[in-house]
Image (cartoon, rainbow, N blue to C red):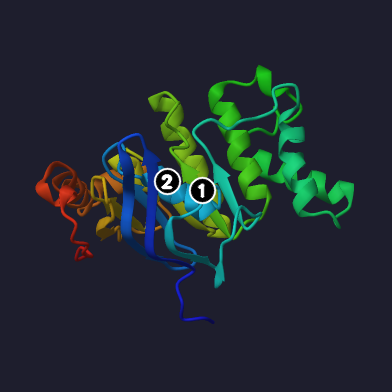
Amino acid sequence: MSSRPFLDIVKLEKSFDTPRGKLTVLSDFHLQVEEGKFISVIGHSGCGKSTVLSMVAGLTEPTDGNIVVGNREIEGPGPDRAVVFQSPSLFPWMTAMENVRLGVDQVFPHATPSQRTDICAWYLSRVGLAREMDKKAMDLSQGQKQRVGIARAFALRPRMLLLDEPFGMLDALTRAELQEVLLDVWARDRITAMMITHDIDEALFLSDEVVMMTSGPHARVGEIVPVDLPRPRSRREVLSHPDYYRLRQQLLNFLEGPASHSPVASRAAA
């Protein structure tokens, strides 16, 4: 087994040319994630959270620095990294099954048609769509569409799962339900996961670590807070855990205090 972290981001920088000159959104960004961990990245709007995820996904090219996933430096998007966006971007005229099948057909070309169907059906069932898999995407609710997006990501059997505000467009009840769906499906495969979120409670419920970014420009990692809450997790048990509100206050203190604007990166004590 390699001693190198599964995700290793070193001296990452991202700059954009603007009418007023170069804008450096991220600078000297370092992050290491062990295989099988679920981390959340939080920070003020505009700090570059989604930009980091986009670069890990291979959708955006860094200005400088390196990103290594599974001992391989990334050079663009690939099936080893599945992305779930805020909007699932389904083909509305296709069924839930057909939308998931598109990716599975590409990633598993040597599997039989029956085997590929079984993979899709299994994950659609896991996210609660056993009865809706033959419905067209246009006939699904927003929450059901996001379930299809989650099933599609896991069905690709990726080595890393990237989630960009996956529940941001949902009402509170649906959001809470899908958080539990995600946690249930993730717990089976323990895929290394990175999630971007503005929701502190969501981050604590799902994550092994919460990465807090400083505000931009020149944003970087401010603190990394371990979330040592036992797994498997239920919402009731998490909320009643004696450490939960201490951790929640720690995150709030960072986001509301001057530390969120500090260029100095540190790892918070457990």
Q: Quadrant of residue 158?
A: bottom right
Residue ID for mark 2: 51
* Horizontal side, residue 22 vs residue 120: left or right: left
Q: Which residue is mark 1?
A: 60
Farthest left residue? 258
Percent x, y for residue 27? 31, 56
Assign the N terminus to one quadrant of the image: bottom right
Q: Amino acid at mark 2?
A: Thr
- Residue in the picture at 76% in, 40% down: 102
Q: Are marks 2 and 1 in contact (CB under 8 Å)?
A: yes
- Residue located 45% across and 72% down the image: 5
Disc 2/disc 1 C-alpha distance (Å): 7 Å
* Quadrant including the C terminus: bottom left
Front residue (pair 161, 51): 51
Other-residue count near label 1 (Cα within 10 Å), few / some / many at <14 / 14–19 / ≥20: some
The residue type indicated by label 1 comes to Thr
Residue 128, visible in the rendered structure: no
Q: Residues within 10 Å of mark 2 (few under 14, many from 20)?
A: many
